[in-house]
Image (tube, rainbow, N blue to C red):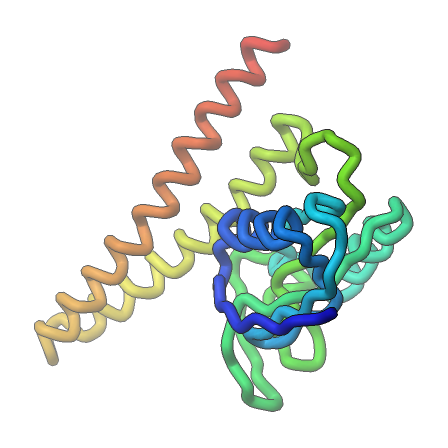
Amino acid sequence: MTKKVNRYFGGFTEKQAKWLNQMAAEGWRLIRTGKMAYEFESCDPGEYQYAVEFIADKSQKNAEDYKSFLEGCGYEVWYKNANLSYSIGKVRWRPWAEADAQITTSWTTYNKELLIVEKENDGKPFELHTTAADRIGFLKKWRNVWLSYTAMFFLMGGLFLLQTPIASAVLGGLGLLSLMPAVLYQVQIGKLRKEKDIDN
């Protein structure tokens, strides 16, 4: 028996992983993904576990190598989009990505920003980032994404300041909103660094 569910999580990887694990706990195993669609087949409740990894900072080669590495570890892996763009020929600049991944297109890594990783449930928590250093690196990626949005909104708000103060205020507000997740990620990074110093 199969079923299809339409959901959109954007870049909220933890929320997406939590939902996929709830579906698995109810006896549904992921078999296919689309832009918004998730297709499941029935399985024993709790038979599988899921993690979602953000890879938009990687070049196409590094993303494919990482996916192959995870598959070599025995995991099932799917690419997933964080955007809802249906256009062909899309080009995007990612200033926070690796040097050879800053320009992305629909032929490379655009709409392949995430990996959904599945493993059989062995009773242990499923974490792709098990060390403090790995976790800090993961959080830095997200912090840098939000900081780039913050900088973009503030820059655009500054450019519109004299011409249209209302647009400038809206863009400044968006800049402040996008700064909040960056600050939250930085707080988490600080906590992990303290824990790492205590452990060492």
Residue 95's place in the image compared with 122, above or below, is below
Residue at 75% x, 45% y: name it: 47
**Residue 104 makes an appearance in the image:** no
Q: Nearer the viewer, residue 93 or 28?
A: 28
Q: Left or right? Give the position of 16 relative to 162.
A: right
User: Where on the picture, by quarter, is residue 98?
Assistant: bottom right
Q: In the orientation shown, which residue stands out farthest toward the bottom?
A: 88
Residue at 63% x, 10% y: name it: 200
Residue at 53% x, 56% y: name it: 96
Residue 91's place in the image compared with 193, above or below, is below
Q: Measured from the top left, where is residue 158 in percent x and y? A: 20, 66
Q: Measured from the top left, where is residue 103 in percent x and y? A: 60, 71
**Residue 133 makes an appearance in the image:** yes
Q: Quadrant of the N terminus?
A: bottom right
Q: Nearer the viewer, residue 77 or 141?
A: 77
Q: Nearer the viewer, residue 28 or 91?
A: 28
Q: Left or right? Give the position of 47 relative to 22.
A: right
Q: Measured from the top left, where is residue 14 in percent x and y? A: 52, 47
Residue at 55% x, 47% y: name it: 18
Q: Nearer the viewer, residue 181 or 175?
A: 181
